[in-house]
Image (cartoon, rainbow, N blue to C red):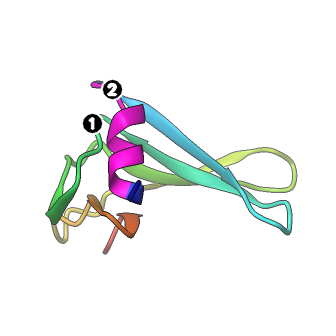
Amino acid sequence: MEFGKRWEAKTSSGAHILAIRDETGKTFGSFATSMWKISSKYFGSGETFLWQANQEEDVVAYKWTGQNDYTLIAENEFIAMGGG
């Protein structure tokens, strides 16, 4: 099964938080109000933002700048959030 088909099968409508912890222990992710979908074009709204937790577990948010509409994109091989 391709990544995109697995992703779509596990998503639902509405807002969601994505949290990732990498191999060095850093925690980061995103918040989005749009449902994930496979698309070659960006989608989503300016309510989407990226975040990271620092060593004290405080969360730093990186909000939409309004300079472009690159909020979410997902294809069979990848997902991406925040492009400028």
Mark 2 residue crowding within 10 angstroms, few (<14) / some (14–19) / many (20+): few
* Label ID, residue 35: 1
Prevailing secondary structure class for the magenta stretch in the rendered image: helix
Q: Is residue 52 visible?
A: no
Q: Position of residue 58 (x, y in %)?
A: 75, 45
* Label ID, residue 57: none
Element at label 2:
loop
Q: Position of residue 39 (x, y in %)?
A: 17, 59
Q: Residue at x 41, y 54 (%)?
A: 1
Do the numbered discs 2 and 1 sit on residues whose CB atoms are within 8 Å? Answer: yes
Q: Residue at x 56, y 52 (%)?
A: 29
Q: Residue at x 19, y 71 (%)?
A: 67
Quadrant of the image containing the C terminus: bottom left
Amino acid type, callout 1:
Met
* Label ID, residue 12: 2
Amino acid type, callout 2:
Ser
Mark 1 residue crowding within 10 angstroms, few (<14) / some (14–19) / many (20+): some
Looking at the image, residue 59 sits to the left or right of residue 62; the answer is right
Residue 11 colored in magenta in the image: yes
Q: Residue at x 22, y 54 (%)?
A: 38
Q: Earlier in the sequence, mark 2 or mark 1?
A: 2
Looking at the image, residue 19 sits to the left or right of residue 58; the answer is left
Q: Position of residue 83 (x, y in %)?
A: 32, 72
Residue 32 colored in magenta in the image: no
Element at label 1:
loop
Q: Which residues are magenta?
A: 4-13
For the residue pair 27 and 59, the one nearer the viewer reads as 27
